[in-house]
Amino acid sequence: MDAFEITAVRAALDLDLPILAICRGHQVLNVALGGTLIQHLDTTDDHRDTMHTVQMVSGSLAALAMGTHEPFVHSFHHQAIEKLANDLAVVGTHHDGTIEAVQHVSKHWVIGVQWHPEDTAADDASQQGLFDALIQHVR
């Protein structure tokens, strides 16, 4: 992980700024808080440039922002969270158990998603909902 990105994430957390961490950002968030990564998924085909559903925890920040507990998402990654940081909670998983979404357990609005909501937000209101919620919390 890049030391600059980890430092930036920690500074944003110290200020309790709203964070929407996407893909590598989701991974950096976990590492910045003491978690670890799987360096290469055995099930890369299920996560590399593909669309799949994620099972979200109802009532989680991400599920509320998206208005669904089963979003259809675009994934493009070969790494994933292995050991979850103590300050994060899993709020979304792939059917193979891969951690797809997290939220901070005590900060105001900190979400990490392993997928790419920006890829489908123009046509998918649930993905756009993540960005809309971020903007609401920044104001």
Image (spheres, helix red, strand yellow):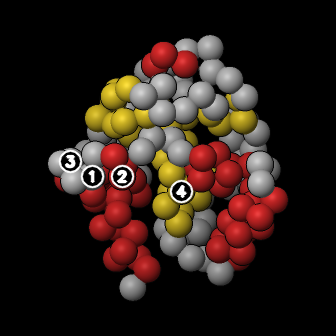
**Dot 4: what SS?**
strand
Q: Earlier in the sequence, mark 2 or mark 3?
A: 2
Rendered residue at 51%/41% (across/down) = 114
Q: Residues within 10 Å of mark 1 (few under 14, many from 20)?
A: some
Residue identifier under label 4: 21
Picture layout, residue 95 above or below residue 130: above
Label 1 and label 2: CA atoms lie apart by 5 Å
The answer to whether one can see residue 63 in this image is: no
Label 4 and label 2: CA atoms lie apart by 12 Å
- Label 2 sits on what residue type? Glu
Picture disc at residue 121: 1
Q: Residues within 10 Å of mark 2 (few under 14, many from 20)?
A: some
Instruction: Point out the image quarter for the C terminus.
Output: bottom left
Evaluate if marks 3 and 1 touch, with contact meaning CB atoms under 8 Å apart. Answer: yes
Label 1 and label 4: CA atoms lie apart by 15 Å
Residue identifier under label 2: 118
Evaluate if marks 4 and 3 touch, with contact meaning CB atoms under 8 Å apart. Answer: no
Judged left or right of residue 24, residue 117 is left
- Label 4 sits on what residue type? Ala
Rendered residue at 55%/19% (across/down) = 44
- Label 3 sits on what residue type? Asp
Quarter of the image for residue 128 reads: bottom left
